[in-house]
Amino acid sequence: MIKAISKLQSKGLRLVAGAYKATPIRELEKETFVPPIDIYCKEIWAKHIRRTYASPAGSYIQEQCRAIGSRLRRKKRKRQGQLQTGATMLTVGQERLAWAEKRAQDLGEGSKKATATEWGRRWAQERRGGRGGWHVSLAKDGRPRPNNIKLYSKLKKAESSAVFQARTGRIGLRHFLAKARVPEISSPECSCGYGLETAAHVLLHCKDRPSSWPRGARFRKIMEAPECVGQVARELIQCGRLGQFSLANKLLYS
């Protein structure tokens, strides 16, 4: 069930963010600050177990589980001809409660805090074992945090999509399209001949268009400043190299 829901969440996030299918789901979740559905569901389950077994109904369930388990073990010993009781076995309910309580000790009892902590640990682990290959993806840096949402809060849909694509590196420029093996793209080089055609190159270094940014401006800095991303989005949409934004260019800026 969680696997099926994860596919739907992934599809929904791509529509909301305007991201390419090639954008890894982990970067998509981090950039939109939406935790993986399995971590979210695990915390909901643990919270439900702790609440249930702390109630009178939970005490009754544990009592009945112990009684049933005791009867089953006695029958098993009689069939096998055993005279000694052996080690005490935990019931399913006790195992679940022990897991939920240990989770609360390790991650905290607050649902949001526990989810964020486990998500951060998984992110760090996957980052250590990950592989490179893309020229730039600012969505890989740091741990998941809500601050990234502020970058998109004042942008139109097309503008936020352009910024999102630039931050992940999966954008309709030659460097990405060549790696994605688009038939019409034979080289990742920019037409100006001075580097790979990436968002950073188009904004700051391309010789075919003058840069509006001060000399020495850093791509990371302008992409992480809420006051700059509006201009970044406008320049990317108006540069004429992203065909998917041609209508947005007319509607937003003409």
Image (cartoon, rainbow, N blue to C red):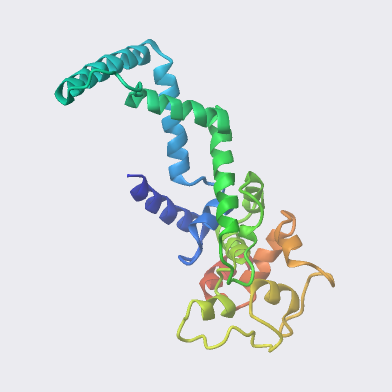
Q: Is residue 228 visible?
A: yes
Left or right of 39, for residue 209: right
Q: Nearer the viewer, residue 108 or 138?
A: 108
Residue most extreme to the right: 215
Residue displayed at 59% across by 61% down? 164
Residue 142 against residue 59 in the figure, above or below: below
Q: Position of residue 188 (x, y in %)?
A: 59, 83
Residue displayed at 51% across by 85% down? 185
Q: Position of residue 97 (x, y in %)?
A: 42, 24
Q: Position of residue 252 (x, y in %)?
A: 60, 64
Q: Nearer the viewer, residue 131 or 243?
A: 131
The quadrant of the picture occupied by the N terminus is top left
Q: How many numbered marks are there? A: 0
Q: Is residue 254 visible?
A: no
Residue most extreme to the left: 79
Q: Nearer the viewer, residue 10 or 153?
A: 10
The quadrant in which residue 246 appears is bottom right
The quadrant of the picture occupied by the C terminus is bottom right
The quadrant in which residue 223 appears is bottom right
Q: Position of residue 85 (x, y in %)?
A: 29, 18
Residue displayed at 51% across by 63% down? 23
